[in-house]
Amino acid sequence: MYPPFVANLLKKRKDVITNLLRKKKDVLAQTLVLCFIFALIIWVLSLLDGLTSVDNDVRTSFLTSMNVSAIEVTEKASCTSEHFCDLEGDIRVDAKSFTIYVMTHNEMVSHSANSWVIRPYPRFYLFHTQWIVKLMSYSEEEKISPKCTEKHYSPAILFSTDEFSLNHYHWFTDVIFPLYMTSFGYTPDIHFLVTDYADWFVPKTHTILRRWSQYPLIDIDNEKERVHCFRKLFVGLKFHGDLIVNKSSPEYAAGVSMQKFRRFLRDTYSLERQIAIEPRLVNVTRPRLMIMSRKSSRILLNEDEISRVANEVGFNVVITDGEQSANQSRFAQLVNSCDVLMGVHGAGLTNMLFLPDNAVSIQMLPFGPLEWWALQQYRDPLPDMNITYLEYRISVEESSLSKQYAPDDPIIADPYSFYAKGWVTIKRIYLTNITFTIDIERIKGTLVEAMKILQH
């Protein structure tokens, strides 16, 4: 029991603390109410801002259906080449006129160079359907711009599938790998719009496309009665080179790489082997060598002898014609089961994509001025695949050209003079209707080198 004066002091202290706590609660409640009122004012002002502008009413005719305020949408039209544009905003794809409209509030666009002609395929020397990307002011909308009939809430890529990409190599280099790069970060919530559509494209590509997009493919050239609208659209495909990712590019910084692409192919085609035969097992289990056989041109006349010497070196040999394979998945699995891939320069070597890491790829390079193309296509991409490149240069004596032309003919004596005549002439002379009889001792040396690489 405290003395009376102490009890009075304690009571007064308790009353003071109680009053302070009550006041603190009142201040907190008042603060919360003020915050709510302030947020409500901002929300109302944003609504009024959208309603008081006639231009914004027009613009949001498409965007309001997405519950997106006009102030949140970025207008962007970045066309970095005649093959590629990156567009954002109110985008309208009109197949009837092959025109893509990017709507803008900038009234100055009608007085400037405000359109681009785009061919949405990476190869500049091939002709494809041309699309016009046109900036259009909302003040001109009623006169020129079409109204949306199909509104899409996800990004899209519009690209071409030229017949050139029927070739196995160009299918991967011109379409599949660039499509992987362009769609990276958006899959599977992205639409694919195909121009120059070919009937072969879907059967050949559906296994890959269904993993990248959850939407049906749009044959955009035949959408004449519809206007497809998007908030983001890529016109064309990102392309750094044949099966190459530029390591200083934003795409590489974002995570695009050849190794990730190869992992994707392994998952897609159920490829079991990530790594080639272990060095310690080479002398116990014979490594597998695949020889890509050709039936129409650049034919190896003594293929059986090459197979025999490869067996002597220590390989189990598989001879196959990849271009005739109807089942891409099954053929990819066959390639993946091998440790070395060898073939004459041509599309069959593209199957290097399915080899396991630490494998070896041997390009047999025909006689002629072919280095620039051959090395760019089948040597340069290999380091990023973790595959070793070897090369066997076919001599003029091993080529049927030695029987067709005299030793002093420029085709034999000065092949590099044909550079000036271009690829079409070079291909006709040095790659078409040519056969080879390979020197067995020379090719044996290359096969021994491949075996040494697997052993270390």
Image (cartoon, rainbow, N blue to C red):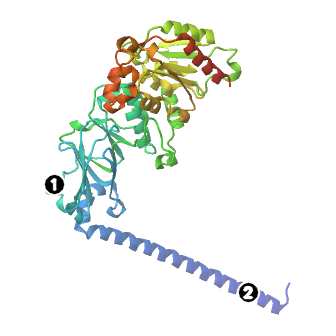
Q: Amino acid at mark 2?
A: Arg
Query: Label 2 neighbourhood size at 10 Å, few (<14), some (14-19), many (20+)?
Result: few
Q: Is residue 118 left or right of residue 172?
A: left
Q: Secondary structure at mark 1?
A: loop
Give how far across and how far down residue 348 sits, in percent. Answer: 44, 21
**Quadrant of the frame with the C terminus:** top right
Q: Is residue 161 left or right of residue 443?
A: left
Up-down relation of residue 441 to residue 100 (above or below): above
Seen from this angle, which residue lies furthest bottom? 5
Query: Label 1 neighbourhood size at 10 Å, few (<14), some (14-19), many (20+)?
Result: few
Quarter where residue 316 is shown: top right
Q: Residue shown at 40%/18% (left/top)?
A: 323
Tell me how far mark 2 sits from mark 1, CA to CA: 80 Å
Give how far across and how far down residue 370 sits, in percent. Answer: 42, 27
Q: Secondary structure at mark 2?
A: helix
**Quadrant of the frame with the N terminus:** bottom right
Residue 201: tell me if it is visible.
no
Q: Amino acid at mark 1?
A: Ile
Give how far across and how far down residue 334 sits, in percent. Answer: 51, 18
Give how far across and how far down residue 156 sits, in percent. Answer: 34, 44
Q: Is residue 61 left or right of residue 237?
A: left
Seen from this angle, which residue lies furthest front? 408
Up-down relation of residue 268 to residue 303 (above or below): below
Q: Is residue 11 left or right of residue 391?
A: right
Residue placed most toward the observer, 159 or 9: 159
Residue placed most toward the observer, 375 or 191: 375
Identify the mark at residue 167; answer none if there is no mark: none
Residue wearing tag 1: 144
Residue wearing tag 2: 13
